[in-house]
């Protein structure tokens, strides 16, 4: 069904990540885990079971020395818009546990609604969704560090990055109290954005010309991951290196990429 | 002979039918008793067993306090500067007046001796506490929506005594969430605080409907 809302007049939160600035330090991953109450696993090296809403990938250009080059690529949930908000995961969810909100452009995941069929994990081309194989267990005393604004997840359900939506709610709370209708750009920033020491991540409303992301996404070196799939993601990457931009999608050897 | 035989068989026929009817009646009676017992268990006994009754640590008198404060509910249940809602007051607020026993109430004496003097926070039982997955913004409803406290919390401000807190033994949630009427009937807006009760108003907010899946409001508006 087509949603009657016009997405151009509403908010559309997104990110622009400058890969030239990213050093691969992993601060965003750590900040994300602690902000969003992601539990520890006994064996965090088991990548089939560990949960990383934000994950830094290491890309290489597969060239021999001295042309060897690497690039780190942080990957949160891409919050795909698809066509009219039909992102891959939203389209397949049989429980209405995941949804696309035309007012914010954020793909929500409701943990109490999810029953763990994992269709969304199969549908997501970015591996941004994670399944809880175990109930969360925090080391003694660690539960006092939990963020009260994010509900912990139980065994048997899927979770993913929410663009720190609770921070948007907190910012709106303040705006309500002060009688404002809108929030400022700086009032709502994700944990990874604030944690990045290199300032590689910029977050804001892609539809708002006053926000930094509005102009950054128009960078000639900007690209999105697997754009050819039509997922229409809201996370833009900027890289001055052509091999990195080319690595963002599957191109044939002689194919000319969509970006110029 | 044949007449006699006929009469005999007809007599035995009648006897059989009578005994058949009798046993049917007994079965029906047992069925009724069973049905009644099941209904009583389901509608009366189970709800009683499901909720444990807890008393508040101190019996607070809202009317008494309401007369002494100037800003109504918000005098004690205030908004913090960052937009969050303070909820039930902390000891620090109570101490402003109750450093020593003020009146002659037995409950106040208990409060001062057991909590104020020992500097222990009062473990109030919050009637309206929602499950973890629920995000509720008091600021949005009270400040922007101009709603009254009474709409969701009932005539709390006019109570002289705190009612018994009923806690669901399975979920641990307050009975105010599920509702007090076991049949699900609702007379006042504050009788029940489940998702559908929030949706009663929220479905009418046409400008906020942005969900692609449900054509209603986005899930994250009330969930976290």
Image: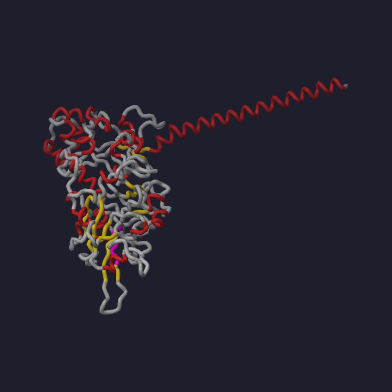
User: Looking at the image, can residue A137 be seen?
Assistant: yes
Give the position of the N terminus of chain A as an image quadrant: top left
Q: State whether residue B123 is above or below residue B17.
A: below
- Residue B113 can be seen, yes or no: no
> Where in the figure is residue B28, as x and y percent of width and height?
59, 29
Q: Left or right: A131 with respect to A28?
A: right
Image location of residue A116, percent across then percent down:
41, 52
Q: Residue at x 28, y 33 (%)?
A: B152
User: What residue appears at the point 28 percent right and 32 percent down from the top-left corner?
Assistant: B163
Give how far across and how far down residue B46 sits, in percent. 43, 36
The residue sitting at the bottom extreme is A65
Q: Is residue A209 above or below residue B176?
A: below
As drawn, is B102 to the left or to the right of B37?
Answer: left
Q: Nearer the viewer, residue B28 or B114?
A: B28
- What's drawn in magenta, residue-wise? A53-57
Residue A16 falls in image quadrant? bottom left
Q: Is the magenta region chiefly helix, strand or loop?
A: strand
| Left or right placement of residue B165 versus residue B144 in this view | right
Q: Nearer the viewer, residue A257 or A214?
A: A257
Residue B15 screen position, x and y as percent: 73, 24
- In the image, is B6 to the left or to the right of B140? right
Examine the structure image and report whether residue B26 is included in the region drawn in magenta: no
């Amino acid at each position: 069904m087509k949603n009657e809302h016009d997405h151009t007049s509403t908010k559309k939160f997104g990110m622009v990540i400058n890969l030239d600035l990213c050093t691969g330090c992993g601060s965003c991953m750590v900040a994300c885990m602690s902000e969003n109450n992601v539990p520890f696993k006994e064996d965090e090296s088991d990548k089939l079971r560990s949960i990383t809403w934000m994950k830094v990938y290491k890309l290489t250009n597969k060239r021999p020395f001295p042309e060897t080059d690497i690039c780190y690529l942080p990957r949160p949930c891409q919050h795909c818009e698809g066509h009219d908000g039909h992102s891959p995961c939203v389209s397949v969810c049989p429980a209405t546990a995941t949804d696309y909100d035309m007012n914010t452009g954020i793909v929500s995941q409701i943990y109490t609604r999810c029953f763990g069929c994992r269709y969304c994990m199969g549908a997501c081309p970015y591996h941004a969704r994670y399944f809880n194989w175990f109930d969360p267990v925090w080391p003694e005393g660690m539960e006092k560090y939990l963020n009260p604004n994010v509900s912990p997840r139980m065994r048997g359900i899927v979770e993913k990055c929410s663009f720190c939506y609770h921070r948007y709610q907190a910012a709106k709370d303040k705006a309500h109290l002060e009688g404002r209708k809108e929030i400022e750009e700086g009032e709502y920033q994700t944990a990874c954005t604030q944690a990045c020491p290199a300032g590689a991540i910029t977050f804001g409303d892609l539809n708002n010309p006053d926000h930094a992301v509005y102009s950054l996404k128009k960078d000639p070196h900007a690209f999105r991951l697997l754009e050819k799939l039509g997922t229409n993601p809201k996370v833009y990457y900027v890289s001055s290196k052509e091999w990195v931009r080319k690595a963002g999608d599957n191109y044939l050897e002689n194919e000319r990429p969509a970006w110029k | 002979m044949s007449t006699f035989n006929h009469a005999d068989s007809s007599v035995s026929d009648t006897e059989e039918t009578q005994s058949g009817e009798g046993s049917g009646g007994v079965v029906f009676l047992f069925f009724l008793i069973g049905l009644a017992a099941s209904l009583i268990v389901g509608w009366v006994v189970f709800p009683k067993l499901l909720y444990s009754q807890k008393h508040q640590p101190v019996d607070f008198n809202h009317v008494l306090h309401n007369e002494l404060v100037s800003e109504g509910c918000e005098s004690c249940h205030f908004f913090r500067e960052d937009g969050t809602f303070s909820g039930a007051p902390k000891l620090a607020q109570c101490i402003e007046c109750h450093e020593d026993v003020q009146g002659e109430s037995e409950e106040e004496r208990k409060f001062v001796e057991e909590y104020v003097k020992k500097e222990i926070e009062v473990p109030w039982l919050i009637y309206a506490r929602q499950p973890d997955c629920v995000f509720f913004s008091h600021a949005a409803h009270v400040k922007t929506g101009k709603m009254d406290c009474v709409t969701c919390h009932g005539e709390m401000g006019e109570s002289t005594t705190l009612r018994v807190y009923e806690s669901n033994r399975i979920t641990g949630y307050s009975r105010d969430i599920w509702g007090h009427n076991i049949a699900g009937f609702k007379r006042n807006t504050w009788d029940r605080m489940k998702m559908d009760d929030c949706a009663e108003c929220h479905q009418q907010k046409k400008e906020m409907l942005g969900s692609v899946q449900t054509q209603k409001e986005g899930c994250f508006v009330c969930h976290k």
